[in-house]
Image: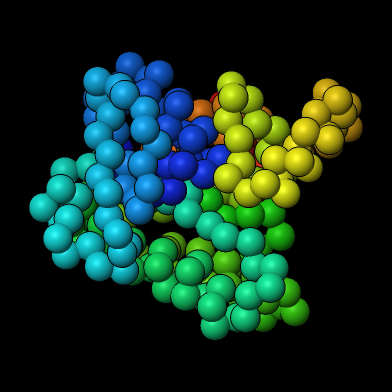
Amino acid sequence: MKVLIFGATGMVGQSVLRECLLASDVEAVVTVGRSKTGRQEAKLRELGVPDLFDLSAAEGELSGFDACFFCIGVASTGMSEAAYTRVTYDLTVHVAQVLARLNPAMTFVYISGSGTDGSETGRSMWARVKGRTENALLRMPFRGAYMFRPGFIEPLHGIQSKTRSYRIFYAVLRPLFTVLHWAFPNQVLTTEELGRAMLIAARRGNERRVLETRDIRALLNA
């Protein structure tokens, strides 16, 4: 497979990047974003794009791919609905429309979040916007589109969040990870498990197109 990763410097992006680089059936990985990971790998190429709302100059390098892992996301704290919609809905849909035109046989895997509101009518702003984004992606003419809604994610293999407050949060909780996995198996995943599951969805698809943590775990165990 040849895969694209948007948001490869974030925690989830680092997770799926690691699994793609380890996978023998992934022959090429291209990351797309304003910043680069800095990793040096034979099958990795990093495509710097200053403005992801304008992919026109990069379109020649965005075709011929089997899968895209879209891992760009921001916390809604302190943001207006209009600002959050632009980063979450507008950007994601714009990129997906370009990729669907260039790669009609592509599988698109989107990282959403636990609590996303697929009805688009709930009281939570971020959940409505995420739900609207998921629904738009599910209507697009990809070979397959899968919405991943992970809950709590335990970072492994040196992977870290880009957000300082999250790094502190994970450091405080680290002694409790074993207990959390045992007590809440349907809410907790490791970065390795999440990355592997995303790759499995791209390889062989899945009956469920919207996957909560329990569905992600079932995908790993199938």
Could you tell whether 181 is left or right of 132 in the image?
right
In the rendered image, the quadrant that contains the C terminus is top right
Residue at the extreme left of the image, as rendered: 60
**Residue drawn 40% across and 19% down?**
22
Q: Position of residue 147 (x, y in %)?
A: 52, 53
Q: Position of residue 198 (x, y in %)?
A: 48, 37
Visual colour scheme: rainbow
Using the image, determine if residue 49 lies above or below residue 20: below
In the rendered image, the quadrant that contains the N terminus is top left
- Front residue (pair 155, 129): 155
Numbered disc total? 0
Q: Position of residue 66 (x, y in %)?
A: 26, 40
Is any atom of residue 205 visible in this view?
A: no
**Residue drawn 49% across and 35% down?**
14
Using the image, determine if residue 142 lies above or below residue 213: below
Is any atom of residue 196 visible in this view?
A: yes
Could you tell whether 68 is left or right of 131 in the image?
left
Q: Which quadrant holds residue 136?
A: bottom left
Could you tell whether 14 is left or right of 191 in the image?
left
Q: Which quadrant holds residue 37?
A: top left
Could you tell whether 81 is left or right of 49 in the image?
right
**Residue drawn 73% across and 74% down?**
124
